[in-house]
Amino acid sequence: MQTLGDIGELAAIERITRGLPKGQKVIVGPGDDCAVVRPAENASEDLVLTSDPVVAGVHFDTDAAPEAVGHKAIGRALSDIAAMGGEPRWALVDVVAPASTPVSIVDGLYAGMGALASDRGLAIVGGDMAEGPVVEIHVFAIGAVPVGRALLRSGASLGDRLFATGALGGSRLGRHLRVEPRLEEGCFLRDWATAMIDISDGLASDLHHLTDMSKLGCDLNLDHIPISDAARRLEGEEAPLDHALYDGEDFELLFTVPQSRCEPFVAAWRAAFELPCADIGCMTSEPGIVRCLHEDGAESTLRRNGYAHF
Amino acid sequence: MQTLGDIGELAAIERITRGLPKGQKVIVGPGDDCAVVRPAENASEDLVLTSDPVVAGVHFDTDAAPEAVGHKAIGRALSDIAAMGGEPRWALVDVVAPASTPVSIVDGLYAGMGALASDRGLAIVGGDMAEGPVVEIHVFAIGAVPVGRALLRSGASLGDRLFATGALGGSRLGRHLRVEPRLEEGCFLRDWATAMIDISDGLASDLHHLTDMSKLGCDLNLDHIPISDAARRLEGEEAPLDHALYDGEDFELLFTVPQSRCEPFVAAWRAAFELPCADIGCMTSEPGIVRCLHEDGAESTLRRNGYAHF
């Protein structure tokens, strides 16, 4: 019969603590830009976790420069961390590729990933490679926020103003490959925003994610929406505004600020950043309903569809 | 033009990890079963991070049951955590699939993943889905170990005995899909082992990883290697021993214990586990050289090759 003396104090303690509830606290599970977990009961920081696949023929054309594809793969993950108000920490990268892939392409992918990661303080600490039919990058990234301070999609209150950074639409003309994750802005917004999401599927779709999770609606001032030059250059069957609403892959931040704090917020933003930040709407009480307020006084309901896989 | 197939998986991984940025609080970067990071200066636990791709046609036949494929995907990641002496915490899962994939298959994948994850205390907190040409699962898993206690491939000393759990070879007959991650055994071994790796590429290949990282060689007693029934059933062109050495995907633990502690270790192991644990060799001074000691007194040098992508 085994006794405590046989196994020793450390083994005994480990043995009994093994069955106890661990510090594996899940603060936010699936459904936000990142999951949020608490590494220990007394931790000073929560960790935000995100995964982003980038697949040839889906997320990039096969003639895109490998460096740009690598940049995009890391940029998408960093944009998710930015949307939580997080700071980048560590990442793992899985690369899938056919055996016939030129080594120079793989070098290019990693050069693009490494440059952006290094620039933004994300340490790529490992990963894996596997053979597969097309080139893919899967980035798993971990960021950190002060405990309890992660900005969620669900935090908006009735009457909060809605803001968007930068300019939207037309990213297919090239900007989708040149993601500029809004990390500094995201950290800054921890002191101001009540809810936040990054615009990856398109303003219309991502705004609905935010209203759904916050159990609110929104009045959207169409003439306040910042439209990119690329969206204007694409004008044809679709108006520039439609590109801004539905194109996606803008990787800008969409967030809410309490009405009472908007004036000091706008002043603080302008003092901190050159990047524009537009007040485009107001949170309303009817869950999931986004009402478009047109410049001429007309009203319509915003359709949801942005980019969707399958 | 040089391709991935020309240079092989290990050369490809070394090539790309060379240039990656290292960051704060990275205890162990690429090259072990998991990366090891420290979430805070005063943390009581280090985190171990691993990513594992499972690709249709490469890691599983397309006629494999989806539940079994899901089980394997989570099992591989848990086996990496076990090899560090870690306890499972959180995971993200990316699933890639053609748009034509029946929902029942995706349900089956997640059912298989969920059942094993839940059974082993791994919380699946998020992930992503994307369209792609074949079904793939990418599991990103995080485990925890007491600070500084992660078991590395590099920790073996001259004279340490080499042990392997379970029985090896023939996993293609089905066991590769029924991964049983050796998590309890891995935690137990924190008190005994000096170096550890899980057997995924095959004993021959993974032993070389351990000797390379520990800058030692090994004398391997061929007649002590535990050979599985499946390896014996496969006997044909290759002997059962060759299956045990080269097949891979055994997901057993390979580890070293100081000579002076072997007797109490073996007694403690037997008291704790029914799973066999075999003493199969001894660490020697000639870096990277694994000498095979045959039952008849003959000697040979072990070739390296186990399973390699590309």
Image (cartoon, coloured by chain):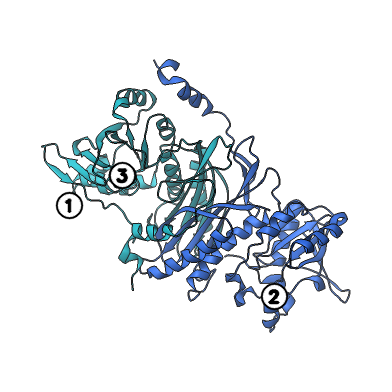
Chain colours: A blue, B cyan
Viewer-side residue, B136 vs A226:
A226
Going by the numbered disc 3, the residue's amino acid type is Lys
Viewer-nearest of labels 3 and 1?
3
Query: Is residue A248 placed above or below B63 in the rendered structure?
Result: below
Label 3 – label 1 distance at C-alpha:
34 Å
Which residue is at 51% across, 36% downward?
B147
Is label 1 on the same chain as label 2? no
Taking depth in this image into account, of B149 and B58 the one nearest to the observer is B149
Q: Residue A173 location, x and y as percent?
A: 61, 77
Question: For this view, does B194 lie left or right of residue B103?
Answer: left
- The residue wearing badge 3 is B215
Question: Residue under circle 2?
Answer: A243
Q: Is residue A169 above or below residue B38?
A: below
**Marks 1, 2: nearer the viewer:** 2
Protein chain holding label 2: A
Report which residue position mark 1 lands on: B237
What's the distance in space between the residues labelled 1 and 2, CA to CA?
63 Å
